Image: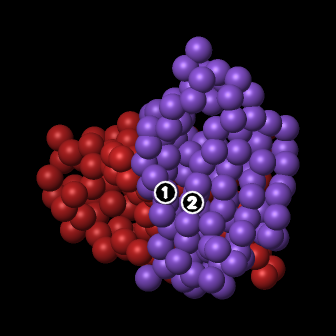
Amino acid sequence: QKEVEQNSGPLSVPEGAIASLNCTYSDRGSQSFFWYRQYSGKSPELIMFIYSNGDKEDGRFTAQLNKASQYVSLLIRDSQPSDSATYLCAVDGEPTDKLIFGTGTRLQVFP
Amino acid sequence: DGGITQSPKYLFRKEGQNVTLSCEQNLNHDAMYWYRQDPGQGLRLIYYSQIVNDFQKGDIAEGYSVSREKKESFPLTVTSAQKNPTAFYLCASSIRGEGVNPPQHFGDGTRLSIL
């Protein structure tokens, strides 16, 4: 059974700081990695996806993938109170045409 | 405006009753998915479909049924066999992947509660 692990948090950072969210996965063969943001009571919203080792940047967000160590990270630069939400990591499941979601990390950005 | 529409937003089920949750998309996506989310939990896959008239069980299919008669629609029925149906139900869709999984996009969800 493939697994995706996230620290539940909360991760508290001051406004303007960098928030670093981490996710580890169990299957070395996983190919697809996703980060979703979920506000309380709302549905998940896609933030980033990454398929290759290294960094992928989009605005204030950077996804970092290290397949050798089996982790994927999300960095949020210049964190804002509006970034306060739960961030879900998702990875290829078994069979590979479905995703396995972690339980999410709650991020709190305080002014 | 392209998107995924789930209805109703809130639904209440009586004991012994089957209820159907609607999911419609106009994104021309081939693949559609149903997830269940319980408080403080991640998403768990109920059923998914990569093509019309075909669907597969996910990790928690017992007590649920689906159909995929049209590309745009993937309704989920919560049957009376599902003894703990109270949850947030999310429908998602994506293009079909070739080698890697494409991103899935979600509807606004349906909250189901037992009366």
Chain identifier of the purple chain: A
| Res A6 label | 1
Please state which amino acid type lies under the numbered disc 2: Cys
Q: Is mark 2 on a helix, strand or loop?
A: strand
Q: Mark 2 points at which residue?
A: A23
* Residue type beneath disc 1: Gln
Compared with residue B10, is residue B86 higher up or lower down, i.e. above or below? below
Q: Which of B71 and A43 is in front in this view?
A: A43
Chain to which mark 1 belongs: A
Residue A32 in sight in this render: yes
In this picture, is A2 found above or below A82? below
The first of marks 2 and 1 along the sequence is 1
Taking depth in this image into account, of B34 and B26 the one nearest to the observer is: B34
Q: Residue at x 44, y 82 (%)?
A: A1
Q: Farthest top residue?
A: A111
Colour red maps to chain: B
Image label count: 2
**Residue B18 point in image, percent of width and height:** 28, 58
